[in-house]
Amino acid sequence: MLDWHSGNRSVLVDHELSGLVLGLTLTTRPEQVYRALLEATAFGTRVIIEAFENSGVPVTEFIVAGGLLKNQFLMQLYSDVTRLPLSTIASEQGPALGSAIHAAVAAGVHPTIRDAADAMGRSNQGVYQPNAERAARYDALFAEYQTLHDYFGRGANDVMKRLKQIKREASNDV
C-alpha cells in the first residue's frame, strides 16, 4: 500500500500522487487493510529517515507524543520498521510541552532543545525496542514498498497523475 491519499509531502514533494492498495483478494479482511495502512505509514517514515541519513543527518531514536501513543501496536510497528528505539513522553500535552521547551530555549532559560527537554519533560527511554525477527520481515516488505514508491513516485509511471487529470476533465463534463 502507498498511503499518499493527499499526495506525498516528504521526500517526493508531489501533491498529484494518490494512494494505492495492492494485493486485495475476495478473502482480504478489513483488519488486514488497516494493518497495511499502518505499515505503509511506517515505511513512509523509514523513507524519510533514510533521506536524512543519506544527507548526513543521523537519526538514532524517536521520541513520540500525542494521541498515537495510545496505539501500542503502532508504536511497536514503527520501532520494528525503522529499527530504532521509540520513547514516549510522560505528558499528555505533547504539543504544548514542545512549545514550552522551544520557548525556554528562545528565552535563554536553557541553552539547547535537548537540555530544555531533559529539564522540562520526562520520557520513558526505550519503551519500544525493535524486535529483530519482525524487523527482518519488515526489511523484506520495505524493499517491496520502495519498489512501488520509486515506480509510482519518481516518474517511472505517471499513471496516478494521468488518472487525476482524467477525473478533473470528467468533472468538467457534469
Image (tube, rainbow, N blue to C red):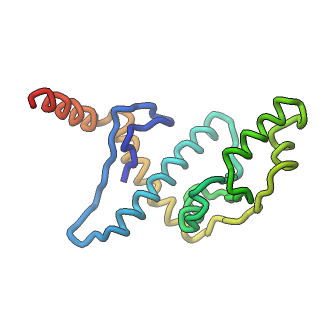
Image quadrant containing the N terminus: bottom left
Is residue 113 toward the left or the right of residue 128 in the image?
right
Q: Please tell me in which quadrant of the rendered image residue 50 appears.
A: top right
Task: Please state the horizontal and vertical placement of residue 54, each as a whole percent of the image.
Answer: 61, 38
* Residue pictured at 40% horizontal, 48% vertical: 3
Q: In the picture shown, does residue 123 fall above or below 113? A: below
Q: Nearer the viewer, residue 32 or 65?
A: 65
Is residue 122 toward the left or the right of residue 127 in the image?
right
Is residue 174 toward the left or the right of residue 33 in the image?
left
Task: Please state the horizontal and vertical placement of residue 75, each as a whole percent of the image.
Answer: 59, 62
Q: Nearer the viewer, residue 62 or 133?
A: 62
Is residue 68 toward the left or the right of residue 120 in the image?
left
Q: Residue furthest left?
A: 173
Image quadrant containing the C terminus: top left
Q: In the picture shown, does residue 125 fall above or below 44? A: below
Q: In the picture shown, does residue 51 fall above or below 118? A: above
* Residue pictured at 73% horizontal, 56% vertical: 91
Q: Please tell me in which quadrant of the rendered image residue 58 appears.
A: top right
Task: Please state the horizontal and vertical placement of residue 80, each as a whole percent of the image.
Answer: 58, 62
Q: Please tell me in which quadrant of the rendered image residue 89 appears.
A: bottom right
* Residue pictured at 82% horizontal, 29% vertical: 106
Task: Please state the horizontal and vertical placement of residue 37, each as a whole percent of the image.
Answer: 41, 57
Q: Nearer the viewer, residue 50 or 17?
A: 17
